[in-house]
Image (cartoon, rainbow, N blue to C red):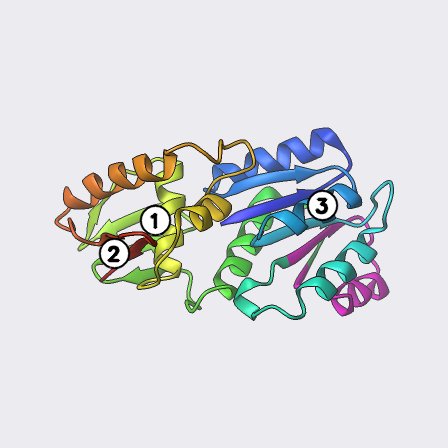
Amino acid sequence: MRVLVVEDEPDLAKALTEGIRRDGYAVDTALTGEEALDKLSAVPYDIVCLDLNLPDIDGREVCRRINAETSRLDDSDTPRVLILTARDSLADRVAGLDDGADDYLVKPFDLAELLARIRALSRRRSVHSGALVEVGALKLDPRRMEVMADGEMIDLTAREFALLRYFMLYPGEVLASERLLDHVWDENIDPFTNTVRVTISKLRKKLAGVGQPEMIETVVGSGYRLVA
């Protein structure tokens, strides 16, 4: 899952990015509203963590524009907006939600709560409503960043975990390499790299090690698919 952090304080933006990335997400940052809107027009983000006090465009206006631009999309393609702000009045919270935000978190907040809210928003984008994601013999716990197959733990890197989580959110669906790059890797990745193929190869070997050698199949000319 790919997250955009919109925060004009560089140190806070860096801290949030690092904390969310440690939880297995691909994370980009934007320091202004215009930069955020530019990135949103080019990348299909899953979640936007949006500060309201931006130096150019008020965050509420950014939220309204996001909502307007994505109103024609399917719900599963619409980024979830989590407002992060010091504006703590009831009127501010109501206004933010009415502008199209999916959640509202008042600063200062604990990183653990932010991550829990991001996980909740991630679940809303998929057919899975519970905390655990299960496909076939696989059981993924996003809170603990653990994956088990028939009770046996699979040792995954953060990127392998993120990739497998994305596959498990869309079981049976053919996912093109470009889509995987958009949602599992951040803007620092070289779009011409073979990192998707390499990471899938490593993930397949680890799945084979726990008796699941055929779960990720290649659909020639189209991409990859997770099968139960």
- The residues colored magenta run 81-103
Numbered disc in front, either 1 or 2: 1
Q: Position of residue 60 (x, y in %)?
A: 81, 57
The disc labelled 3 sits on which kind of residue? Asp
The circle on residue 98 is: none
- Residue tagged by mark 2? 138
- The disc, 1 or 2, on the residue closer to the chain's N-terminal end is 2
Considering the numbered disc 3 on the image, is that residue within a helix, a strand or a loop?
helix
Q: Residue at x 71, y 29 (%)?
A: 11
- Helix, strand or loop at disc 1? helix
Judging by the rendered image, the residue that carries numbered circle 1 is 164
- Using the rendered image of the protein, determine whether residue 39 is visible from the camera's viewpoint: yes
Q: Which residue is mark 3?
A: 38
- Foreground label between 1 and 3: 3
- Which of the 4 quarters of the picture holds residue 188? top right
Near mark 3 (Cα within 10 A), the count class, few <14, some 14-19 or many ≥20, is few
Q: Marks 2/3: CA distance?
A: 37 Å
